[in-house]
Amino acid sequence: MTARSILALAVALLLTAACAPADDGGLHPPDVERTWAEFRETPTDDTYLRFLHANRLAAMQHGNPGDAAGVLHQVRALEAQADQARRAGDLNLADAVVMRVLEIEQAEMLGVYDEALPGARERLLAARASVEGMLR
């Protein structure tokens, strides 16, 4: 390995480390984290809508639904929708959660999502399971 290739590798590793999120909370902009925390703490129609709006805007700006941040946008949206469906007794929203997780599963993307964001598979399946009983 030449000195030039070692230097290039070192720069690449430094850039990768500098750009990597520190933890799950670092994957999303502060407004998404704030609205997510607000919804989890006080689940109301208003906090639900604020979170969905902030999450959707951030996801569109991020533009990559397949990396860790993109998967987290999707997972949290489905978790929030499942919570809201149960809280409000909204069968249409419950059905939408079940169908979206089923689409991800049928496209064989659960494993891909879990690789990008460890635990995503379990979280998505739990969101679906939490509302399936409403539809029976």
Image (cartoon, rainbow, N blue to C red):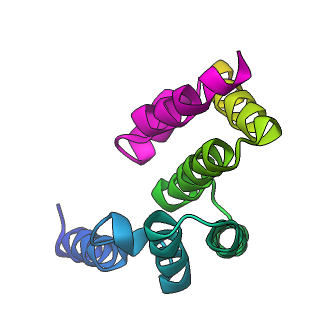
In the rendered picture of this protein, how many numbered marks are placed on residues?
0
Q: Is residue 92 left or right of residue 57?
A: right
Q: Quadrant of residue 134?
A: top right
Q: Nearer the viewer, residue 82 or 12?
A: 82
In the picture, the quarter occupied by the N terminus is bottom left
Q: Is residue 37 left or right of residue 133?
A: left
**Side of 82 where 30 appears, left or right:** left
In the rendered image, the quadrant that contains the C terminus is top right
Residue 42 in picture, x, y percent from top left: 50, 69
In which quadrant of the rendered view does residue 86 lie? top right
Q: Is residue 105 magenta?
A: no
Main secondary structure found in the magenta portion: helix
Q: Say whether residue 117 is magenta.
A: yes
| Foreground of the two, 124 or 70 | 124
Residue drawn at the location 46% of the way across and 55% of the way down: 68
Q: Residue at x 72, y 22 (%)?
A: 135
Residue positioned most to the top: 136
What is the span of residues highlighted in magenta in the rendered image? 107-136
| Image location (x, y in percent) of residue 19 | 37, 76
* Residue drawn at (46%, 64%) of the image: 40
Where 18 falls versus 85 (above or below)? below
The residue positioned 50% from the left and 29% from the top of the image is 125
Residue placed farthest to the bottom in the image?
30
- Pinpoint residue 9: horizontal percent, then vertical percent: 26, 68
Residue 94 sits above or below residue 81 on the image: above
Check the image and report above or below for 34 versus 56: below
Q: Residue 108: percent from the left, percent from the top?
A: 60, 22
